[in-house]
């Protein structure tokens, strides 16, 4: 896949950008949750027992196979030189070490949510992420909210407050995903590397931990005594799904990068909401997840805030385009 360069004014390139963007967010919103759900159900009962052990094993495999897939991509795209440049920069390595930690938390919580039949809660975390990004921008980058954006933040905060107070439970899945991914985006901006090179370094940083965890499980010592691993006893389907988790991690990143080069930021922002929408509908309509009745008010407030924020962002971008558009040529 070659770099097309800036092409946001070319209708043909914009159409290609939309195609890549839809594929990326459809994968994140529909295909990958199906992948994880199928993986959870394909594993033997002895593997899935024990709380977070099976999600942690899935995460370890996702990291290792994503790293292998990234090595293949670097070879295909001839970007090993870029990887070498990143590895020689102490600043870049420090940043990617932190982002690797953040993304590992995000991945593990999402896998756990799917495994526990709470994909709808994970989707809400990604709905809230754009608002978390705004708050982080204010706190760490000195950015300011436009006046019309404050109601969006207030509605989302009211929704979260209802989930904590009215619904009677702390929304740790939602907040863990939103905060970890928000900080990931904030820190990742400071590393001047592309998505594939960045993901390669991040998975390389996490790989030793993943290998150590899988060896620990395979030995069956200490807390892992008596537990089976999916790779050993899960059968061909489970093994195939574990291996393909690397493809599911890296491929949509390629599509997203191709879309981001061709589409305006506002278009990417709207596409961003399609993934959690797909996840929520998938969880409730196809995975038969039950949303407690008392939670609906909190979700409605959050969705109202997100919708307000998206609409205000679109109108603001439209006003900017009109303001900078060239006037009619003089006669």
Image (tube, helix red, strand yellow):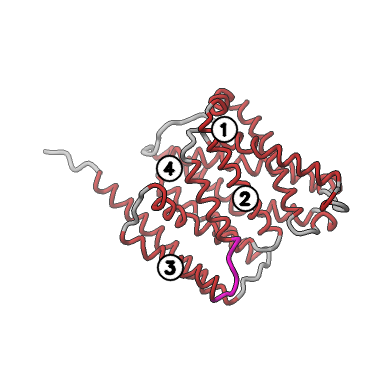
Q: Are marks 3 and 2 in contact (CB under 8 Å)?
A: no
**Which is nearer the N-term, disc 2 or disc 4?**
2
The residues tagged by marks 4 and 3 sit, at their Cα atoms, a distance apart of 29 Å
Q: Nearer the viewer, mark 4 or mark 3?
A: 3
| Disc 3 residue crowd, few under 14, some 14–19, many 20+, Cα 10 Å | many
Query: What residue does disc 1 label?
Result: 197
The residues tagged by marks 3 and 1 sit, at their Cα atoms, a distance apart of 38 Å
Q: Are marks 4 and 3 in contact (CB under 8 Å)?
A: no
Residue 263: mark in rendering: 4
Please tell me whether mark 1 sits on a helix, a strand or a loop.
Answer: helix
Residue 155: mark in rendering: 3
Q: Quadrant of the C terminus?
A: top left
Query: What residue does disc 2 label?
Result: 105
The residues tagged by marks 4 and 1 sit, at their Cα atoms, a distance apart of 22 Å
Q: Name the residue rendered at 57%, 55% in the picture.
A: 177
| Disc 4 residue crowd, few under 14, some 14–19, many 20+, Cα 10 Å | many
Q: Nearer the viewer, mark 4 or mark 1?
A: 1
**Which is nearer the N-term, disc 3 or disc 1?**
3
Q: Are marks 4 and 1 in contact (CB under 8 Å)?
A: no
> Which residues are drawn in magenta?
166-173
């Amino acid at each position: 896949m070659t770099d097309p360069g800036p092409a946001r004014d070319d209708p043909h390139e914009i159409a290609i950008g939309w195609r890549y963007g839809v594929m990326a967010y459809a994968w994140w919103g529909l295909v990958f949750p199906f992948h994880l759900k199928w993986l959870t159900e394909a594993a033997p009962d002895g593997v899935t027992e024990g709380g977070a052990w099976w999600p942690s094993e899935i995460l370890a495999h996702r990291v290792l196979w994503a790293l292998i897939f990234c090595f293949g991509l670097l070879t295909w795209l001839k970007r090993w030189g870029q990887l070498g440049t990143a590895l020689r920069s102490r600043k870049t390595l420090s940043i990617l070490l932190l982002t690797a930690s953040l993304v590992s938390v995000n991945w593990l919580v999402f896998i756990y949510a799917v495994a526990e039949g709470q994909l709808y809660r994970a989707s809400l975390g990604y709905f809230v992420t754009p608002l978390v990004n705004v708050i982080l921008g204010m706190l760490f980058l000195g950015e300011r909210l436009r006046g019309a954006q404050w109601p969006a933040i207030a509605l989302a905060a009211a929704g979260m407050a209802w989930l904590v107070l009215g619904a009677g439970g702390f929304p740790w899945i939602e907040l863990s995903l939103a905060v970890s991914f928000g900080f990931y985006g904030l820190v990742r901006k400071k590393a001047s590397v592309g998505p594939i090179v960045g993901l390669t370094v991040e998975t390389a940083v996490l790989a030793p931990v993943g290998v150590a965890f899988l060896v620990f499980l395979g030995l069956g010592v200490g807390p892992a005594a008596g537990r089976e691993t999916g790779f050993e006893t899960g059968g061909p389907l489970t093994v195939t799904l574990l291996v393909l988790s690397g493809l599911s991690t890296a491929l949509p990143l390629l599509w997203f990068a191709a879309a981001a080069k061709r589409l305006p930021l506002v278009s990417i922002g709207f596409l961003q909401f399609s993934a959690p929408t797909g996840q929520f509908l998938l969880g409730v309509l196809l995975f038969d997840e039950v949303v407690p009745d008392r939670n609906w008010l909190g979700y409605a407030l959050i969705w109202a805030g997100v919708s307000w924020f998206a609409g205000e962002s679109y109108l603001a971008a439209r006003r900017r385009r009109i303001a900078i558009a060239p006037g009619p040529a003089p006669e």
